[in-house]
Image (tube, rainbow, N blue to C red):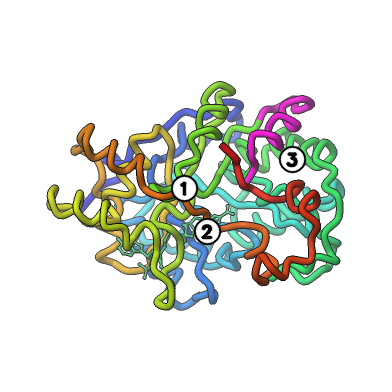
Amino acid sequence: MASCNTIPAAELISCSSDAGGRAGIPLVGLGTAAFPFAPETTKPAILHAIELGYRHFDTASIYQSEQALGEAIEEALLTGRLHSRSELFITSKLWCTDAHPDRVLPAIRNTLRNLKMEYLDLYLIHWPMCLKPGAAPFPVKAKDILPLDLKSVWEAMEECQRLGLTRSIGVSNFNTTKLQELLHFAKIPPAVNQVEMNPAWQQEKLREFCKGKGIHITAYSPLGGQTNPLRPCPVMDSPVLRDIANSKGKTVAQVSLRWVHEQGVSVVVKSFNKARLKENVQIFGWELSEEDRRKISLIPQSKKVCIEGMLSISPQECELEPHELSEVDVFELE
Ligand SMILES: NC(=O)c1ccc[n+]([C@@H]2O[C@H](COP(=O)([O-])OP(=O)(O)OC[C@H]3O[C@@H](n4cnc5c(N)ncnc54)[C@H](OP(=O)(O)O)[C@@H]3O)[C@@H](O)[C@H]2O)c1
């Protein structure tokens, strides 16, 4: 069984140490987004993950998993699986209906109440998008999208860190254009940009940009996202990854996670299955060959998560004009 010592961590810029807490973001974390939401499996999976050595847990108000995560951690502390909250790295995210300057503090306080915690390790703007307060949170309706006042929302995020409600702040689904806009006025630069990244969506340009600015990347959907039996997955069904996995005696998931890890980023991967939870942390102590990396670099690129998907309509039926899409979309064009 892996122990917490076996999951290494990366340092973050602009992370305040006043609130105490662990140093660095663990390089493998557990994602808690399940659609449909699965409260009965979330808590036991988190407890098992803690036993396996997972210390980073990724949640968001939109996932409805904050409460289950808080309950699991409370139980882990009571039963001695954990000694202190400070062993953990907890990430949560501001949903688009709260991406208004006056709603950020109430939103993080609500998240902390759900988690039964005094502070987060990382609070992210979930999307570079603003929705009318009170609008249906998901799927997003085009009529509810408002211009995002990024400067004022970021000032409110900075206030969250100053008040000690979170040890660091960052963004998610930001492309280089949005990051540049943010860096122009940020007094506290974003510590992390959490984005979709896997062998079928490699994010080379964004990675290069973030490296230059000291912004750490966390890869989400590192296996290509939630399994859909009706659609092949460009990661899990990749013949290239399957051949590499067979030749190494590893699984496709491990090859994908190892590739992501070798790009110098951290990863949040979701599994609520005991065997797969264990499999997903066994990516250290071995490596891909130059030839494996070359083959992976040639895998056709396709992005899964995009604004059309959030609107739950096909791109052909998208109600937004192309210029509106580019404001909120997360594509990083090469
Ligand atoms: N910031 C954002 O906008 C954003 C967007 C999406 C996701 N995220 C975060 O990233 C986390 C992970 O991303 P994701 O859930 O989209 O996708 P993912 O982690 O790439 O894939 C999860 C899917 O793969 C299956 N799986 C996990 N390990 C496996 C293995 N070893 N072998 C075979 N199948 C395996 C899981 O099923 P089982 O549970 O049955 O194992 C689940 O269906 C989320 O939970 C969330 O915390 C963030």
Tell me if residue 92 is in the magenta stretch.
Answer: no
Residue shown at the point (64%, 39%) measured from the top left:
175
Residue shown at the point (55%, 46%) measured from the top left:
195
Q: Is label 2 or label 3 in front?
A: 2
Q: Residues within 10 Å of mark 3 (few under 14, many from 20)?
A: many
Residue occupied by mark 2: 304
- Disc 2 residue lies near ligand 1 with CB under 8 A: yes
Residue 201 is marked as 1
Rendered position, 298 above or below 39: above
The quadrant in which residue 123 appears is top right
Left or right of 333, for residue 74: left
Q: Earlier in the sequence, mark 3 or mark 1?
A: 3
Q: CA distance from mark 2 to mark 3?
A: 28 Å
Q: Position of residue 3 (x, y in %)?
A: 26, 47
Left or right of 147, for residue 281: left
Please state which amino acid type lies under the numbered disc 2.
Lys
Q: Quadrant of the C terminus?
A: top right
Residue occupied by mark 3: 157
Q: Position of residue 215 (x, y in %)?
A: 56, 29
As helix, strand or loop, the secondary structure at mark 1 comes to loop
Residue 266 is marked as none
